[in-house]
Amino acid sequence: MTEIATRHTYTGADAVVAAIKFDANGLVPAIAQQHDTGEVLMMAWMNADSIQETLATGRVCYYSRSRGGLWRKGETSGQTQHLKELRVDCDGDTLLLLVHQDGVACHTGRRSCFYRAARDGGLVPAIAQDAATGEVLMMAWMNREAFDETLRTGKAVYFSRSRNKLWRKGEESGNVQEVKGIFIDCDADTILLKVNQLGGAACHEGFKSCFFRQLEGTELKVIAERVFDPKAVYKK
């Protein structure tokens, strides 16, 4: 049985924690990206305690689902991650950590966890990254059917958990994602898509990236301009 990660009350990071939509196990996906090169290094999980520790120390701390406890990145290997910026996506259910990676990020000894081929089964997180600029645009979910259609058409297709069906990115807004490269991480449980984002915006709120809120001190601030008006694009 999956252990539910404990959530505590904090003083310094209350606003950050309050802005995050943790899952039923008290966890949220966290993408680590090298702050100066744009390379996506890995995807792991955080709970409220690991977020608090990360903000307090400046060294990234995750939550290990397999070990059922905090995982201080590099505590065994010395390959620590130093936090430069923390951003929360438009839905509040995914974090983007801009970090400085000491050494390598992957436990296999590779710089990035995204070097493998795909596998079958279930839903997996899928990160979309601008192929030209390296900017992380969004994180969604894929099942095998979505992955196969993406491969066949060259356009990003995800699986919508809220609607329980395939979600062809841009089918309503026209902001299609043309896939330029597909990478799978070391554990074969996260996909990285390098895409050409048509329409200039990946976010349903009209921003180029879903990660348009950045932590400054203890406040989340909007750091980007809207590319389009969502009310004009989404008629429903």
Image: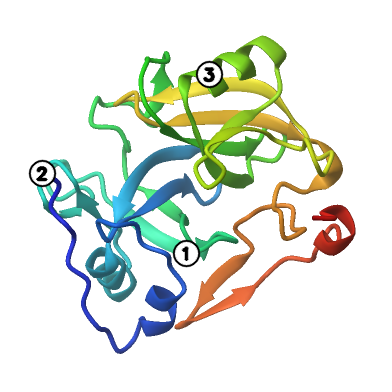
In which quadrant is the N terminus drawn?
A: top left
Badge 1 crowding class, 10 Å Cα cut-off, few under 14, some 14 to 19, many 20 or more, is many
Q: Name the residue carrying label 1.
A: 86
Measured as percent of width and height from the top left, residue 195 is found at 68, 30
Q: Name the residue carrying label 3.
A: 145
Q: Nearer the viewer, mark 2 or mark 1?
A: 2
Which of the marked residues, 1 or 3, is nearer the chain's N terminus?
1
Extreme bottom residue here? 11
Residue in view at x 82 percent, y 46 percent: 200
Residue in view at x 49 percent, y 42 percent: 161
Q: Nearer the viewer, mark 1 or mark 3?
A: 3
Rendered image quadrant of residue 189: top left
Foreground residue among 98 and 96:
96
Label 1 and label 3: CA atoms lie apart by: 32 Å
- Name the side, left or right, on which 45 lies relative to 86: left
Measured as percent of width and height from the top left, residue 143 is found at 47, 26
- Name the side, left or right, on which 2 lies relative to 176: left
Which residue type carries mark 3? Glu
Which of the marked residues, 3 or 2, is nearer the chain's N terminus?
2
Q: Name the residue carrying label 2.
A: 1
- From the viewer's perspective, is residue 195 above or below residue 204? above
Which residue type carries mark 2? Met
Dot 2 falls on a residue whose secondary structure is: loop
